[in-house]
Image: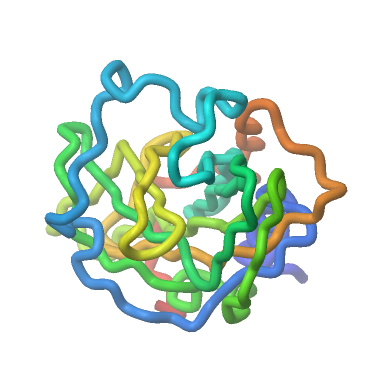
Amino acid sequence: MISRDTAAQRRITATVAMALVLAGCTRDHRGQSGDPSQPPPASRAEAGPTASTEPTGECPPTGVRIRATGGDAASGLRALGIELVNCGEHPYQLNGYPVLHVFDEEREPIMLRVVNGAKEITSGFDQPPRRVTLAAGERATAVVLWRNLVTDSTVVATNGEFLTVAPAAGQPAEEVDPDGPIDLGNTGRIGVSAWKKADPSTPVPTRPAPPPAPSAAPSSVSPPDSRL
């Protein structure tokens, strides 16, 4: 009998990216989303089109464009695919994990722990990062994972509304569409896989894919996860 988590994991893996061998090497970044050196994202009206809403727009000065490719939610486990496109003219190198910052509805940074890999969240997403070189037009992908899990009703659940992603620490971040609320419950953590070079035979989506319906409607209060 296949467990609910195993079925959800297979569903998410198939939905987010084909041939995606995802990342691990768990490492804490306590307070990374509250890094004062990372300003809150501008409002959508001020920011104008971003990679997630205008994938064919002008290439940023960084030479790369980052966007979300759609999400999935099943049994309280959430996954959001992201991709980085080398829209410049020169090769672009990656070797590690995307850097995430989550903001609330007032665009204030949310203090949480970003876990490189998903070892504390689910299994099957913990292969270590490898050096990736993207030629012009090539893409890299990663997955953001979290759980809508509440284990203490006295602790207010956290909901993020905005997400920025940078290719690596110290590099400019872009706002991406989180495809819904980042409903972390009271876990205080979010996971992200390492960058993985995308299969060149996989078509580039013209817009983020809508998430499939979950196998079971997630509850706002989930039972404790024995693996956490």
Q: Which residue is the extreme one toward the front?
A: 90
Q: Nearer the viewer, residue 101 or 76?
A: 101
In the picture, measured across the screen, residue 200 lies left or right of residue 143, that is right
Q: Coloring scheme of the render? A: rainbow
In the picture, measured across the screen, residue 39 lies left or right of residue 113, that is left
Residue at 24% from the left image edge and 30% from the top image edge: 42
- The number of numbered discs placed on residues in the rendered structure image is 0
If the image is split into quadrants, where does the C terminus sit? bottom left
In the picture, measured across the screen, residue 51 lies left or right of residue 147, that is right
Q: Nearer the viewer, residue 199 or 210?
A: 199
Q: Nearer the viewer, residue 59 or 73?
A: 59
> Looking at the image, is 9 positioned above or below residue 162?
below
**Which quarter of the figure has residue 29?**
bottom left
**Which quarter of the figure has residue 147?**
bottom left
Where residue 137 appears, as percent x and y from the top left, is 70, 44
Where residue 205 appears, as percent x and y from the top left, is 71, 33
In the picture, measured across the screen, residue 41 lies left or right of residue 182, that is left
**Which quarter of the figure has residue 216?**
top right
> Looking at the image, is 192 positioned above or below residue 126?
above
If the image is split into quadrants, where does the N terminus sit? bottom right
Residue at 36% from the left image edge and 47% from the top image edge: 173
Q: Which residue is the extreme one toward the right?
A: 201
Residue at 17% from the left image edge and 57% from the top image edge: 34
Where residue 130 appears, as percent x and y from the top left, is 62, 77
Residue at 66% from the left image edge and 49% from the top image edge: 16
